[in-house]
Each structure stands twice: as structure tokens, then as C-alpha cells.
Image (tube, grey):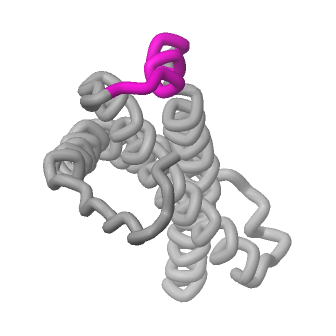
Amino acid sequence: MARVGKTHQRRTQEGVLRTFIQVTSLVLTLEAAFFLARGNLGLSAENIAELGKMKLDYNADVIWSLSEQRADTWIGVVLLLMAFSLQMANTLWQVRWVDFAVSKRGAVLGVIVSAVIGVGAYALSPDLAKRTEARVKQILEVPAPTAPKPSGQPLK
């Protein structure tokens, strides 16, 4: 009787883990889509217009917008890779007929862990954007080297 109890407990734990992996990977995929969409669709019409103008100096708003897009895209890619890894692990895990049951505990745990990861990623995004913005401003403040004009050729 004790053996049957341990087998049932192991199957229950495996069911919780399998459901956790499935739900977490699905929610991470959704979070990745959010960050990738935000990163790619975040450029406003005003910033696009600013990018099209010729200027003598840089536009801080454009730098910030592009920095945010870069940060959100990186976060989206990382979340997408995490979701893919979980789905691959789930696919390679041997499935038995009894493994098709869904564990409510695993589903709730998967949603909670995914929410924590999503909130953490959302909090990390502005910091990554600030780092990119600082790097871009550093690049823009360094004077560009001027190429020497070849001698003997007329100026155009």
C-alpha cells in the first residue's frame, strides 16, 4: 500500500511539473510577444519625422525612444527563448497516458512564476533603455574624425 501511495505522489508531482512547464511557456510566449510588439511598434510618428530631418545636433527624445525599443526587443527575445526552451523540454519529456491530466496547482504556479518574470522584465526594461541612451549620447558627444581631402582634386 505504501508503494502505491509513493507512485501516486510521484505522478502527482510530475503532473504539477508538466502543467507548470506548459503554462509557464505559454505565458512567457505571450509576455515575449508583448515586449517585441512594444519594442517594434514604439516609434511614434513624431520621432519618425525627427529621424527624417537633417540636424546639426541630436534629438534626446528620438534617442530615448530607440533605446526603449532596443531594451524591449532584447527582453522579448530572451522571454521567447525561455518559452522555447520550456516547450522543447516538455516535448522531449516522455509522455504516458496518465500524463495528459492537467494539474490546477501546476497551472496556478506557472501563471504566478510567469507573472513574476513578466513584472521583473517590465521593471528591467527602463534600466536597459537608460544604459543604451547613455551609450548613444556618449557616442554622439565624441567628435567624428574628419577625413583629409585628397590634394589636387577640386572641391564639389
Residue numbers of the magenta segment: 45-55
Q: Residue at x 73, y 82 (%)?
A: 92
Q: Residue at x 30, y 31 (%)?
A: 64
- Magenta-colored segment: predominant secondary structure: helix
Q: Quadrant of residue 33?
A: top right
Q: Is residue 63 magenta?
A: no
Would residue 124 be visible to someone looking at this image? no
Q: Position of residue 134 (x, y in %)?
A: 16, 46
| Figure disc tally | 0
* 91, 95: nearer the viewer: 91
Q: On the rendered structure, is 110 left or right of 148?
A: right
Q: Position of residue 31 (x, y in %)?
A: 52, 40
Residue farthest to the top, as pictured: 46
Height in image: 26 above or below 149?
Answer: above
Q: On the rendered structure, is 86 left or right of 78?
A: right
* 45, 72: nearer the viewer: 45
Placement of the N terminus among the 4 image quadrants: bottom right
Q: Residue at x 39, y 49 (%)?
A: 113
Q: Position of residue 20 (x, y in %)?
A: 54, 57
